[in-house]
Image (cartoon, rainbow, N blue to C red):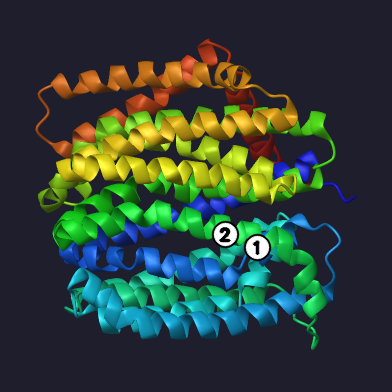
Amino acid sequence: MPEISRSKTLHGLAWSLFERIGQQGIQFFISIILARLLMPSEFGLIAMLVLFVSLATALLDSGFGSALIQRQNATRVDESSIFYFNIVVGLVVAGLLSLAAPWIAAFYNMPILVPITRWTSLNLIINSFGMVQMALLTKRVDFKTQMKASLLATACAGGIGIVMAYKGFGVWSLVVQSLAVNTLRTGLLWILYSWRPLLAFSIKSLRNMFPFGSMILLTSMLNTVFINIYLVVIGKIFTPADLGFYSRAQNIQQLPVQQIISTTVGRVIYPVFSALQEDKARLKRGLSKALSTTALINFPLMVGLAIIARPMVLTLLTDKWLACVPYLQLLCVVGLLYPLQIINLNMVKSQGRSDLYFKIEALNKALVVVAIAVTYRWGITAMIYGQMVTAIIAFFLVSHYSGRLLEYSIKEQLQNLWPSLALAGVMGGLIYTLNYIPITNQALLLSLQVISGIVIYAVLCHFFGIASFKEIVEIVKLRLASSSNPG
């Protein structure tokens, strides 16, 4: 069985992190400009379509991307068969989404969603030509190539969106931006990566990977529905502006949590865990290391983000977005646990236990249904409190099942996570006191809190000898030394 070395894992993790930080950093900068040029209701219109587009995207992959990564002996015929399958599914799903556009518009009572949905559906066809390349690059832990494609595509497409927004195209600037980024990224993947499909298609290849891929597909669709179900409920019950405020808060919270940390760690550890799937001892050590390192980074990010939410929104987005601040602060509590769930779920998936993966996710989503049914009548804030409760229960649920596979109990996991949470809490309390200093300039307050938070947390980690912090510092030192001495 091929094995991925520790140095290759760290190298892949570094490039994956650079790619996500770079892409999301550029996207965040672009979104700030667009948020100043557009209205919350226009962002709300796009948020209304997120569930439907995400479901179509899950169907497009059909779980074969994950199956291709998990299978260590996949052939060129397997890869080519999935490539052609993705294109056919992309055409079919895009057509179905276009046909459903009038019903989607009627559901929200927003006629403008008909043309928006149909133009947005073209992304499915575009993305179908690059999904196998992305899966193969991920399997090779090659995120440097993905970084090049993503950064250039995001920057160029963002520029197009900003120009259109400035020229008064409104919501269509967001539609064209999404089409441009997917077209550019797919084209760059073909240019930068030498893989080409064979003129071969095998039903047998698809059938062999279907049992694993089908469960991943069902889980992905289930997960997609419930990740975005709050957008649907809020969009249906409340106004587009209310949905715009909630989606903006969600996007800010997800930038460090889901878009950078969870995606970065998840797509690196899945191929690594898959390569080590038969070595339980090493898997346990790897899972422990992944959880503690992620907590070391994510806990202070979420605590700090909740503290600086108000000055950040006022400084970057202006006071027209101020209503999203309380939503953002509460969502940060949800964000504390989400990456830890992703890591545990990737470990389960790497064992080929897509059945257990689906079972865990089904139980988690049942909790979400209960939470929404109980809380929606009291407003958006109450719904977020429901998310907080389900996030806590979901963490203990997935930790229980993953722990049983590796004999790594919930108690052991909590012991690894507790130090980072405690130090993040101390850091948050100290930077919160800066709010009592009579500073009227919100940008100055924001800068002071961010710098103070970074320094305080680093000092605390060093003082208390946090192992993950020491390892990160050593890796940074080695990288700096190797870059300064290339010979």
Find out whether the residues at labels 1 and 2 contact each other: C-beta distance under 8 Å.
Answer: yes
Q: Circle 1 is placed at which residue position?
A: 214
* Amino acid marked by disc 2: Leu
* Amino acid marked by disc 1: Ser
Q: Can residue 379 be seen in this view?
A: no
- Quadrant of residue 485 in the image? top right
121 sits to left or right of 472: left
- Residue at image position (84%, 36%) is 279
Query: Which mark is drawn over residue 218?
Result: 2
165 sits to left or right of 462: left
Query: Which mark is drawn over residue 158?
Result: none
Whether residue 35 is situated above or below residue 149 in the rendered picture: above
Residue 74 screen position, x and y as percent: 83, 65
**Residue most extreme to the bottom:** 199
Q: Is mark 1 on a helix, strand or loop?
A: helix
- Residue at image position (62%, 71%) is 131
